[in-house]
Amino acid sequence: ETGVTQTPRHLVMGMTNKKSLKCEQHLGHNAMYWYKQSAKKPLELMFVYNFKEQTENNSVPSRFSPECPNSSHLFLHLHTLQPEDSALYLCASSQDRVAGGKSEQFFGPGTRLTVL
Amino acid sequence: GQNIDQPTEMTATEGAIVQINCTYQTSGFNGLFWYQQHAGEAPTFLSYNVLDGLEEKGRFSSFLSRSKGYSYLLLKELQMKDSASYLCAVLPRGSYIPTFGRGTSLIVHP
């Protein structure tokens, strides 16, 4: 399988549940990202990992817990979420070419999360 | 930080040309991306501009003016399948992490 994959594609959970979102990239990239996309809002960057090290945490509540065991896999662990956390959660990967050259992001299809 | 502005929604007719503008204010600039996102799907890369000028890629072209903090995406010979959200994203100097605008929802009607 190629590109960026995400599972599950849809998730419905209660506020007391614990669930995890999974992302996998087969592009050889070293940077991986979690974004939240709510209706009528811009993409919100949540976390960035570079070579398995977290480099960005955009003031995300602790009920979202990321994990990056290697450069190809990224998880988002969810617990005690709120209804306002319902959104599309997108994973992306890229090369971290800071010095030059485009470093476009490749996005997964997303997980549509509904918190009841 | 970055401040990115693009129109919320635009409508156009099949077969026509539409220009989607994006203005940005940033303390340092590396380049600008355009992405297309169909409803319920992942954003997909369209273009990346670093230097001033127009870059053409089939029916889509992207323009950049660094001095004016301005870019546009030009879509020609519009098709119904071009109905989507178009995201402008700025890559700050010294970073590989882009900042996204709110996106422009384009509706193409017959």
Image (tube, coloured by chain):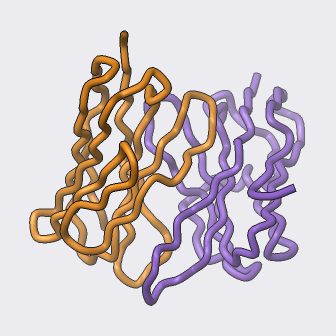
Chain colours: A purple, B orange
Query: Where, by quadrant of the figure, is residue A29 drawn?
Result: bottom right
Place of residue B82 in the rendered image (x, y in percent of width and height, measured from the top left): 44, 30
Place of residue B57 in the rendered image (x, y in percent of width and height, measured from the top left): 39, 54
Viewport quadrant of the C terminus of chain B: top left
The furthest residue to the left: B68
Relative to A98, B25 lies left or right: left
The residue shown at (31%, 67%) is B1
Query: Where, by quadrant of the figure, is residue A75 drawn?
Result: bottom right
Relative to B82, A14 lies left or right: right
The residue shown at (52%, 72%) is A103
The furthest residue to the top: B110
Of residues B109 and A24, which is closer to you in this image?
B109
Place of residue A83 in the rendered image (x, y in percent of width and height, measured from the top left): 67, 27
The residue shown at (25%, 35%) is B7
Above or below residue A3? Residue B107 is: above
Of residues A79 and B73, which is closer to you in this image?
B73
The residue shown at (34%, 19%) is B14
Place of residue B71 in the rendered image (x, y in percent of width and height, measured from the top left): 22, 55
